[in-house]
Image (cartoon, coloured by chain):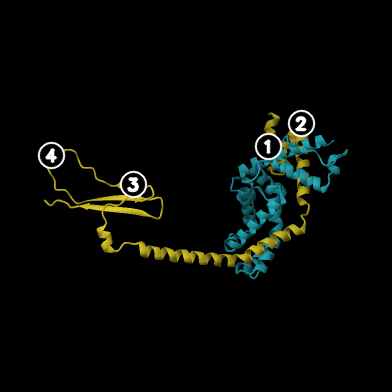
Chain colours: A yellow, B cyan
């Protein structure tokens, strides 16, 4: 077996991550391979260095600074939320007033002709328009048809529906 | 030690129970228990103390907001490691990429026996620089397994990976770290 194939297992063995049987196989190979002995000792040394460096204490002032920042943020939190609550309440009230003023009364709605093109560019989609067959052998009475036109404006909250209903024919 | 802390945190009238009701003094006690875990892990993952402090602050704020959920998980440490890794990952994406293996800086001091002559500061510098040669996932796997001492299974849970993936990441990370350390000392002597 090529030593490159041993590399992963040797690296795992250096940190004690192999099952006993695998660890023994690695030890047998390392015992007779100078290159892999160097690899294993290098891995152990670098791990030891890393662990020593990691174990060195961090100045207590850094922990205290984090604690102080977190507690200050938590103490500030409720006041900040209340300030925003007022903003949300005013915005909601304004929206309700706007809807009451702008919403057309029933008689106005009936008088509406075709929808006018809105100021913002619109994307119009005609939904579910039944296609009539080109040739009919026998003339069947037409049922009532509903055509719905959905007009989407740039404002996602404003969608205009135009619903037209044709009178059906009776038999 | 960890088990003792966990038991303490789980006590009925323990600091976490009071912290959940908004007692900031109790939450400060909880922070003191886990601050080393969070700050030092973040420091190893980000390589910069100021960034690590920012990450720690975010982790503890998330802990405060999720105290009930964390208690239900019954493992503060696992939750904190997972959130610390996620917060650092998000912060790390906005920062500079890892250094190339060739970018070994000049050593701070020189001597006949390089490893013996290392000062604490230089040892930490070598560790941080070697960690920066790793990919984010390799770094997280190595930090949790080799520096924080979690089992492969715990690391896999914290990183949301399989154990096989974690083993592969750990072995690659160890080989890269060893290469960096050897290059560093070869230049030093």
Q: Position of residue A1 (x, y in %)?
A: 68, 29
Counting from the top left corner in percent of width and height, residue B14 is at: 66, 68
User: Mark 4 highlights which residue?
Assistant: A137
Q: Nearer the viewer, residue B127 or B171?
A: B127
Badge 1 or badge 4: first in the primary sequence: 1
Q: Residue at x 73, y 33 (%)?
A: A29
Q: Which residue is mark 1?
A: A8
- Real-space CA distance between mark 1 and mark 3, rounded to the nearest whole angstrom: 61 Å
Q: Residues within 10 Å of mark 3 (few under 14, many from 20)?
A: few
Front-most of residues B36 and A10:
B36
Asked whether the beta carbons under mark 1 and mark 2 sit within 8 Å of each other, the answer is no
Discs 3/2, front:
3
The reply to whether residue A48 is in sight is no
Q: Quadrant of the C terminus of chain B?
A: top right
Q: Chain of mark 4?
A: A
Q: Earlier in the sequence, mark 4 or mark 2?
A: 2
Q: CA distance from mark 3 to mark 2?
A: 73 Å
Output the chain of dot 2.
A
Sequence-first disc among 4 and 3:
3
Residue A167 image position (x, y, % from top left): 18, 52
Foreground residue, A129 or A161? Answer: A161
> In front: mark 1 or mark 4?
4
């Amino acid at each position: 077996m090529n030593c490159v194939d041993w590399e992963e297992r040797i690296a795992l063995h250096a940190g004690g991550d192999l099952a006993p049987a695998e660890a023994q196989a690695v030890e047998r190979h390392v015992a007779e391979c100078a290159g892999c002995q160097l690899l294993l000792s290098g891995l152990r040394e670098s791990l030891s260095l890393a662990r020593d460096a990691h174990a060195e204490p961090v100045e207590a002032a850094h922990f205290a600074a984090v604690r102080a920042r977190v507690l200050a943020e938590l103490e500030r939190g409720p006041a900040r939320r209340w300030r925003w609550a007022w903003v949300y309440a005013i915005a909601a009230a304004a929206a309700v007033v706007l809807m009451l003023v702008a919403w057309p009364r029933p008689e106005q709605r009936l008088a509406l002709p075709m929808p006018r093109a809105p100021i913002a560019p619109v994307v119009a989609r005609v939904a579910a328009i039944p296609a009539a067959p080109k040739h009919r052998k026998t003339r069947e009475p037409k049922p009532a048809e509903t055509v719905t036109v959905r007009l989407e404006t740039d404002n996602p909250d404003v969608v205009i529906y135009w619903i037209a209903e044709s009178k059906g024919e009776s038999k | 030690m960890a088990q003792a802390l966990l038991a303490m945190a789980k006590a009925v009238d323990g600091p976490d129970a009071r912290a959940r009701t908004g007692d900031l003094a109790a939450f400060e006690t909880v922070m003191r228990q886990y601050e080393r875990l969070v700050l030092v892990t973040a420091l190893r993952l980000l390589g910069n103390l100021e960034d690590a402090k920012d990450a720690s602050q975010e982790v503890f704020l998330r802990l405060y907001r999720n105290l009930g959920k964390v208690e239900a998980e019954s493992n503060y440490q696992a939750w904190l490691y997972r959130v610390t890794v996620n917060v650092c990952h998000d912060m790390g994406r906005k920062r500079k990429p890892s250094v190339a293996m060739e970018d070994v800086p000049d050593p701070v001091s020189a001597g006949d026996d390089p490893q013996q002559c290392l000062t604490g500061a230089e040892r930490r510098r070598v560790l941080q620089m070697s960690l920066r040669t790793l990919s984010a996932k390799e770094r997280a796997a190595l930090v949790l397994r080799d520096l924080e001492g979690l089992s492969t299974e715990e690391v896999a849970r914290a990183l949301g990976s399989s154990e096989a993936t974690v083993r592969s990441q750990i072995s690659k990370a160890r080989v890269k770290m060893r290469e960096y350390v050897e290059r560093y000392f070869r230049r030093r002597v």
